[in-house]
Image: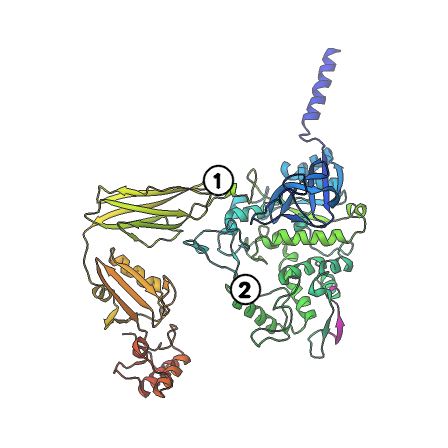
């Protein structure tokens, strides 16, 4: 009998411990009206601060996790802009619902292939919404999925592929091409910068978005008439410029004359192209904003493109706002999108054919293509937060379409959840995870740094005279939370000596800037001889024989590579120091070598305008000088003297004209 009892106990214990999960109670709150979250359970308490120092507030119908209660307040945990916070909300501003998870269901998710940390969160969603279905989607279409950081590095391999806006500089990349010496370089119009690897990793980690508010970034975007109704589309459009009707005139392409409604256009496009009309409407709202943009209001740009529309911003790319807008309108003209209906209907083909039908069938994969070759390409959006914010917008539209919470809980949706291998224990946007080890400035007193400092360069040679016995290193980190180990004043005892500046990021990552100090004899070569030795001609403080379309950085590096002690400063025609960009007539070059100093003005023959080009503007400028309506002087006069006879006359005008007609090549010699 004892033996049988023992066997039964062993079987029972194996059954119990083999489950690895246990049901638990989860409390979810839905915020009912706007409220600024407090740091303590009191209406007079200070507000919880967001990542940019502002007050964190929530509004209807944002979901939160309820952690506990204190008097008239609930303690909550919530996500805002990708950051997670805890705080307190007045009980009158929130409705609270309690759910019990199902351990058998959680185990079934693990058996399907979901990792344990996925399964726990999905079990919570299942407790709220028993009819929602979750399917594991293996990234790279390989067993177990892609390696997570292989995917992150792939997304980060091209500067600007993932962009972020806002004032939080800790979310921006400091890699080469994205940042230089304390200044971030725009990658998609003003205000948009390359996202850091930490930022990219966070928004690529599906576990961060397996909650009711953001899980819709994983919604299957094929057409489902049961859940994607005109009523929901109208809720997406509510409060936007698309809530109003539009008119199609007699000349509008593929649009019947008369009054039309945006919701009908989205429904027609979704039905015909077998893609979610809710998704189409949300995508346009994401692209154009609630008030519309210059590409969706039909007013044109700089007197052109009036009556053309590009609702999906197809082809609207570029590094400046002007490039983005012009390219977007040029696409609209090419496609004859001269009305709202055609722009939306035809533009939907991009979503249907280029994304949904080829396997990028949720918002996540449209932003992060880790599902079909060419990986990290064919991505709709640069905004690294797009899938997150658009998924949240879809959630709100769906939620508001149900009149009762019980109906919302019984809704039916299908989700494709990306799976990766070798995921970290967690990803975060918090400063504790910041890995930035760059310097924003580095200067050395007592020797000449070569090349000139740039944040992404970590190896330098620093040339000093034979008599140098001490240098002084001055450095500053890009991230204020990083730790700097700067040797400061260093005694130099050898003709070649290595000094290191160490930066430790707040997450423990380290970076080393290496400076090799080399003591050599000074050369005492004059600035004129320096310029002549690298092929640049000098004449009365003017310099020439510089190729058209040369870059300022090439002149600087060429001089410093040949003359280690030489200090070179280039300024534009307005006196502003520059280190790169096209060489132009009127720029100045100052060289200081061993105390010998001189400043020269650049001359590009054929460029009296001073823009670095030879074009019709220069022809007109020579003509104006001949007619005395604009008198050229100094380096600009010399630039117009094409035949070098000391005059600017009809002969020079003819030579510029022949150059433009490709019948003569203006020489810079």
Residue shown at the point (30%, 53%) measured from the top left: 450
The Cα atoms of the two marked residues, 2 and 1, are separated by 35 Å
Q: Quadrant of residue 237?
A: bottom right
Residue 459: image tag: none
Residue shown at the point (69%, 52%) measured from the top left: 220
Observer-nearest of 197 and 474 = 474
- Most extreme residue toward the front is 44
**Mark 2 or mark 1: which comes first in sequence?**
2
Is 580 situated above or below 586? above
Residue 146's x, y, as percent? Answer: 56, 45
Is 183 situated above or below 108? below
Residue 8's x, y, as percent? Answer: 73, 18
Crowding around mark 1 (Cα neighbors within 10 Å: few <14, some 14 to 19, many 20+) is some
Is 252 situated above or below 236? below
- Most extreme residue toward the top is 1
On screen, residue 477 versus residue 63, left or right, reads: left
Q: Quadrant of residue 344?
A: bottom right
Crowding around mark 2 (Cα neighbors within 10 Å: few <14, some 14 to 19, many 20+) is some
**Residue of label 2:** 317
Observer-nearest of 669 and 491 = 491
**Where, quadrant-wise, is the N terminus in this rendering?**
top right
Residue shown at the point (65%, 74%) measured from the top left: 338
**Where, quadrant-wise, is the C terminus in this rendering?**
bottom left
Question: Is 260 included in the stretch rendered in magenta?
Answer: yes
Residue 507: image tag: 1
The reply to whether callout 2 and callout 1 are in contact (CB within 8 Å) is no
Residue 317's x, y, as percent? Answer: 54, 64
Residue 552 seen in the current view: yes
Question: Is 158 included in the stretch rendered in magenta?
Answer: no
Task: Check disc 2 and report its element: helix, strand or loop.
Answer: loop
Magenta span of residues: 255-263
What is the basis of the colouring in this image? rainbow
């Amino acid at each position: 009998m004892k033996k049988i009892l023992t066997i039964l106990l062993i079987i029972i214990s194996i059954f119990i411990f083999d489950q690895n999960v246990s049901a638990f109670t989860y409390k979810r709150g839905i915020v009912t009206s706007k409220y600024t979250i407090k740091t303590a359970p009191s209406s007079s308490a200070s507000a919880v601060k967001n990542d940019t120092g502002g007050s964190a507030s929530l509004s209807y119908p944002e979901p939160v996790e309820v952690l506990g209660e204190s008097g008239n307040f609930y303690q909550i945990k919530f996500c805002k802009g990708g950051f997670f916070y805890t705080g307190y909300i007045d009980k009158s501003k929130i409705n609270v619902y309690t759910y019990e998870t199902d351990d058998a269901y959680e185990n079934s998710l693990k058996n399907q292939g979901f990792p344990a940390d996925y399964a726990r969160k999905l079990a919570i969603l299942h407790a709220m919404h028993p009819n929602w279905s979750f399917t594991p989607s293996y990234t790279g279409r390989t067993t177990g999925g892609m390696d997570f950081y292989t995917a992150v590095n792939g997304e980060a391999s091209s500067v600007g592929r993932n962009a972020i806006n806002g004032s939080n500089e800790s979310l921006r990349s400091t890699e080469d091409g994205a940042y230089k010496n304390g200044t971030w370089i725009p990658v998609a119009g003003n205000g948009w910068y390359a996202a850091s690897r930490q930022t990219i990793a966070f928004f690529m980690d599906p576990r961060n978005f397996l909650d009711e508010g953001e899980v819709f970034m994983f919604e299957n975007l094929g057409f489902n008439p049961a859940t994607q109704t005109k009523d929901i589309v109208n809720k997406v459009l509510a409060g936007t410029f698309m809530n109003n009707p539009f008119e199609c005139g007699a000349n509008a392409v593929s649009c019947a004359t008369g009054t039309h409604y945006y919701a009908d256009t989205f429904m027609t496009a979704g039905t015909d192209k077998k893609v979610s009309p809710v998704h189409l409407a949300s995508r346009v709202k994401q692209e154009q904003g609630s008030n519309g943009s210059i590409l969706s209001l039909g007013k044109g740009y700089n007197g052109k493109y009036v009556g053309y529309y590009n609702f999906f911003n197809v082809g609207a790319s570029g590094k400046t706002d002007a490039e983005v807008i012009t390219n977007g309108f040029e696409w609209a003209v090419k496609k004859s999108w001269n009305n709202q209906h055609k722009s939306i209907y035809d533009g939907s083909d991009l979503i249907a054919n280029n994304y949904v039908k080829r396997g990028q069938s949720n918002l996540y994969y449209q932003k992060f293509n880790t599902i079909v070759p060419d990986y990290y390409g064919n991505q709709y959006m640069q905004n690294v937060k797009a899938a997150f914010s658009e998924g949240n917008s879809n959630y709100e539209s769906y939620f508001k379409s149900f009149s009762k919470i019980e109906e919302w809980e019984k809704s039916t949706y299908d989700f494709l959840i990306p799976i990766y291998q070798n995921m970290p224990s967690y990803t975060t946007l918090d400063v504790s995870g910041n890995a930035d080890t760059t310097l924003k400035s580095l200067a050395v007193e007592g020797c000449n740094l070569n090349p000139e400092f740039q944040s992404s360069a970590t190896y330098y040679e620093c040339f000093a005279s034979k008599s140098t016995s001490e240098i002084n290193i001055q450095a500053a980190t890009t991230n204020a939370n990083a730790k700097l180990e700067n040797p400061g004043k260093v005694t130099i005892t050898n003709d070649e000596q290595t000094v290191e500046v160490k930066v430790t990021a707040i997450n423990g990552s380290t970076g080393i800037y290496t400076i090799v100090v080399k003591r050599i004899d000074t050369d005492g070569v004059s600035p004129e001889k320096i310029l002549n030795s690298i092929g640049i001609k000098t004449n009365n403080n003017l310099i020439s024989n510089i190729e058209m379309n040369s870059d300022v950085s090439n002149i600087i590096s060429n001089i410093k590579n040949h003359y280690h002690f030489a200090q070179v400063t280039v300024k534009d025609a307005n006196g502003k120091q520059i280190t790169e960009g096209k060489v132009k007539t009127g720029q100045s070059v100052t060289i200081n070598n061993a105390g010998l100093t001189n400043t020269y003005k650049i001359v590009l023959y054929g460029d009296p305008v001073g823009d670095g080009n030879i074009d019709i503007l220069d022809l007109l400028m020579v003509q104006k000088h001949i007619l005395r309506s604009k008198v050229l002087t100094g380096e600009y006069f010399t630039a117009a003297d094409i035949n070098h006879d000391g005059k600017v006359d009809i002969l020079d005008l003819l030579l510029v004209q022949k150059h433009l007609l490709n019948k003569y090549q203006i020489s810079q010699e």
